[in-house]
Image: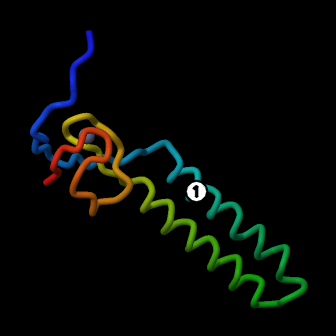
């Protein structure tokens, strides 16, 4: 039994979710481990700049990971939205608010 797509498009709330385990967490872990490792590898060659690059990479990954840990879902079909600015669900065309 299949349900046809609703028409006109429904108005659906935007659901905010955050994942404790997932890609964002993985990226943050990568930053925490990879940053110091890269710093330690580069430091003998570049001195303080090695640590700056490693630390910068760690911070960039931590910020990136925390952003990825939060995401939006369509309230109608629970499709994951690519950004918070999406106004129409690409899957079910519901208007998001
Ligand atoms: Zn949807």
Which quadrant of the figure contains the N terminus? top left
The residue tagged with tag 1: helix, strand or loop? helix
Decide which of 10, 38 is in the foreground and name it.
10
Which quadrant of the figure contains the C terminus? bottom left
Q: Quadrant of residue 27?
A: bottom right
Residue under the point 63% across and 63% down: 32
Residue under the point 21% across and 30% down: 5
Q: Position of residue 59 (x, y in %)?
A: 56, 73
Q: Position of residue 40 (x, y in %)?
A: 81, 74
32 over 75 or under it: above or below: below
Residue under the point 14% across and 43% down: 12
Q: Is residue 10 left or right of residue 76?
A: left
80 over 85 or under it: above or below: above
Q: Quadrant of residue 45?
A: bottom right
Q: Is residue 38 left or right of residue 21?
A: right
Circle 1 residue: 27
Ligand 1 placement by image quarter? top left
52 over 23 or under it: above or below: below
The tally of labels here is 1
């Amino acid at each position: 039994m299949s349900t046809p797509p609703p028409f006109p498009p429904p108005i659906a709330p935007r659901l905010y979710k955050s994942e404790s385990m997932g890609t964002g967490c993985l990226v943050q872990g990568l930053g925490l481990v990879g940053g110091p490792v890269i710093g330690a590898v580069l430091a003998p060659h570049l001195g303080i700049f090695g640590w700056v690059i490693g630390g910068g990479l760690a911070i960039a990954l931590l910020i990136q990971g925390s952003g990825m840990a939060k995401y939006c879902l369509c309230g109608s079909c629970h499709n994951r939205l690519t950004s918070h600015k999406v106004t129409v669900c690409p899957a079910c065309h519901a208007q998001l608010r």
